[in-house]
Image (tube, grey):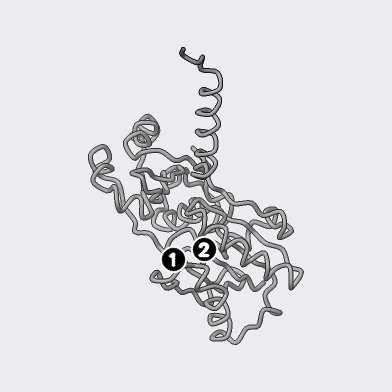
């Protein structure tokens, strides 16, 4: 099965062509340009270099989040458009789960923990915690979710995980782990820290094995985790307006 996979959760992101359990080609995007400026050109260039046409793609896979709101919307919309035209399904894959699978490549210790940390900016991280099980690489059974996607500051995340993490070997992966390595080392000095890898290849391989997660393009929804600023601002304004209406007028 040929899978076209796209990740737009980071500034550069990546695109990959996967066939069964093998990554045929994978490349990073140009971080100096927005995803809207680069897509779908980067996809077309990758397929052309591989000698593959869109008609040959049997499944589309896309990082569903978390990440920047604009990046997610552009990435998902791009893949939805391609899948609609070719009447193909899409497999939305959590970037945190993809990171955790990549981190699990470095350990054969069943029961070890892998922590995916993505930089959420505002001094926060998007995070998820998994335990390595006995499943094969990039199979859904490879990881057991200990805590699902969350967003909070690094110290609060480490405190929340303390009782679980202190009893096991742990690998942190992602640009959030790189940025907050010092904070991680203060509580988990022996932790393994893995840099943020290209994710499109892992997303494509997970899509191959996650047959139950494939869906009609229109059904794909972003995994934002954090609420959009516009939504928070609307609520703030509504509360302010209601307070003003209910406040008694002073003579």
Q: Residue at x 44, y 65 (%)?
A: 198
Say if 120 sits above or below 48 in the image. above
Q: Is residue 179 visible?
A: yes
Kindly state the secondary structure of the residue where label 1 is placed.
Answer: loop
Nearer the camera: disc 1 or disc 2: 2
Say if 53 sits above or below 107 in the image. below
Q: Residue at x 36, y 38 (%)?
A: 153
Q: Which residue is mark 2?
A: 7
- Left or right of 121 on screen, residue 100: right
Quadrant hosting residue 175: bottom left
Task: Looking at the image, tell me whether mark 1 or mark 2 is earlier in sequence order.
Answer: 2
Kindly state the secondary structure of the residue where label 2 is placed.
Answer: strand
Q: Residue at x 38, y 36 (%)?
A: 157
Give the farthest residue toward the top: 251
Q: How many marks?
A: 2
Q: CA distance from mark 1 to mark 2?
A: 8 Å
Q: Which is more toward the observer, 235 or 69?
A: 235
Q: Is residue 146 visible?
A: no
Give residue 198's mark: 1
- Left or right of 85 on screen, residue 162: left
Give residue 248's mark: none
Q: Are marks 1 and 2 in contact (CB under 8 Å)?
A: yes
Tell me residue 121's x, y (percent): 37, 48
Name the image quarter holding the N terminus.
bottom right
Q: Which is more toward the observer, 69 or 187?
A: 69
- Binning the other alpha carbons within 10 Å of mark 1 as few (below 14), some (14 to 19) or many (20 upward) gives many
Tell me residue 7's x, y (percent): 51, 63
- Binning the other alpha carbons within 10 Å of mark 2 as few (below 14), some (14 to 19) or many (20 upward) gives many
């Amino acid at each position: 099965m040929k899978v076209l996979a796209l990740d737009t959760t980071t500034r550069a992101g990546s695109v990959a062509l996967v066939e069964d359990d093998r990554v045929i080609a994978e490349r990073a995007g140009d971080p100096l340009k927005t995803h809207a400026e680069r897509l779908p050109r980067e996809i077309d260039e990758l397929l052309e270099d591989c000698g593959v046409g869109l008609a040959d793609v049997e499944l589309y896979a896309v990082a569903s989040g978390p990440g920047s709101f604009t990046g997610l919307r552009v990435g998902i919309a791009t893949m939805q458009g391609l899948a609609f035209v070719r009447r193909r399904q899409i497999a939305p894959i959590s970037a945190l789960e993809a990171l955790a699978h990549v981190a699990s490549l470095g350990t054969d210790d069943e029961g070890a923990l892998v922590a995916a940390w993505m930089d959420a900016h505002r001094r926060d991280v998007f995070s998820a915690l998994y335990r390595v099980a006995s499943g094969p690489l990039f199979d859904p059974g490879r990881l057991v979710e200990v805590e699902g996607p969350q967003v909070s500051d690094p110290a609060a995340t480490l405190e929340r995980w303390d009782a679980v993490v202190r009893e096991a070997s742990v690998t942190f992966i992602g640009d959030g782990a790189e940025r907050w390595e010092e904070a991680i080392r203060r509580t988990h000095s022996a932790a393994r820290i893995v840099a943020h890898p290209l994710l499109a290849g892992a997303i494509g391989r997970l899509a191959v094995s996650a047959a139950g997660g494939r869906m009609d393009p229109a059904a794909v929804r972003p995994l934002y985790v954090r609420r959009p600023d516009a939504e928070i601002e609307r609520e703030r304004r509504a509360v302010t307006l209601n307070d003003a209406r209910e406040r008694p007028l002073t003579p």
